[in-house]
Image (tube, rainbow, N blue to C red):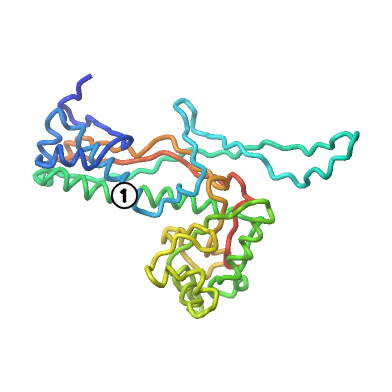
Amino acid sequence: MSVPTWPSSPGQIISASAGGLDFKALAEQYGKLSVRELVSTTSGLALAQLVAARAAIQLATLVDARRFCRVDMVPPGGGRVYHFQFVQIPATFEAEKNEAADLNATDVNLSDQQATLKMYAVRTNISDLAQRQAAVNLAEVVGIAHGNALNRGMNADIYDVLDDSTTCVVTKGTANDGNVTGYDFNDIMYLKGAIEAQKGRADTFVTFPYASGGTNNGKVGFYPFVMQNITAVQFTTALTSYVATGQISELFGLKLYVDDVYKPSNVAANGARYASMCVGGEAVGWAQAEDVISEIQRWAPFIGFFIVSHVTGDAVTVMEPHTGLIKHA
């Protein structure tokens, strides 16, 4: 079926998914066309493709919390609730088997966690006056903005479920003291050990860059952690590459995710999260029903059109004992 001429009527919508799209190839193909030329011909689909592809690229350049999740694709017809199956950690394990004795089996209990799908969306209004500019330039700007917005929504959802950690928790400061106390090497190692005691091999560490607050104007976050420990002996072995390049991929075998979206609104509040740890690809699940999809819709009362990008998914804690939290008491 051929793509209809757009816009043939007010409210007509053309959409495109980012799946399989190559922004560079699309930009080369349509690089000489203005927005008006692109959306007023049978190539109207191309603008939606350009925005979706650029938004997907933007997601790849940001801190994408889905990278440490167990990502399951929700099939068409799968409904709004997705079930993550997992095996509960047994309390005891089988001892030595004695000859001629019956085996005392330890039950392996299957369980599940349910993720209720949500939609994350962002809209940009483009007036007819803006249609004179190059389509690729517009798609670049809108795609970056939409990618940033979708990334923030999905990451915030994933970080919120990390707050559900109750089995492995390290607290800082004293409840109701109104102060901020930063975490240190000991806190990281204690939390890693607590997760290992639950038969999990923690490999992911999530925190935010910097925050200050409280009555003591305390500092907390990854950068204060670096500065507070930069003269310590253990710093020279764990963070040497950070001194040289300003980047670090792992800390004691933990992949590092430093994201300002993770930062709590009040770092001095009781229970404010400072850092999380988990077993990547296992402890936290992300149910994804669709890739980035961008749509364009003509809206005559606005004398222009709307560009809307959205994704559908939801995060859930699958293995809570394999997650950990450093937080204010």
User: Residue drawn at (24%, 31%), measured in percent from left and top?
Assistant: 14
- Give the residue furthest to the front: 99
Residue 301 at what x, y percent from top left? 17, 38
Note whether residue 7 is visible: no
Q: Residue furthest right?
A: 100
Q: Position of residue 142 (x, y in %)?
A: 24, 47
Residue type at the position of mark 1: Gln
305 lies above or below 203: above
Instruction: Check the picture and name the quadrant holding the N terminus.
Output: top left
Asked where in the image residue 277 lies, by quadrant, the reply is bottom right
Name the residue rendered at 91%, 34% in the picture.
100
Residue occupied by mark 1? 58
Total number of numbered labels? 1
**Is residue 31 in sight in this rendering?**
yes
Q: Is residue 249 left or right of residue 201?
A: left
Q: Quadrant of the C terminus?
A: bottom right
Residue 130's place in the image compared with 265, above or below, is above
Label 1 Cα neighbours within 10 Å, binned few <14 / some 14-19 / many ≥20:
many
Q: Secondary structure at mark 1?
A: helix
Tell which of 3 and 198 is nearer to you: 198
Looking at the image, residue 79 sits to the left or right of residue 133; the answer is: right
* Residue 56: percent from left, percent from top: 32, 44
Image point 50% across, 44% down: which residue?
315
Q: Position of residue 57 (x, y in %)?
A: 30, 46
User: Closest to the observer: 286 or 94?
Assistant: 94
- Left or right, 152 with respect to 146, comes to right
Between residue 163 and residue 322, name the one nearer to us. 322
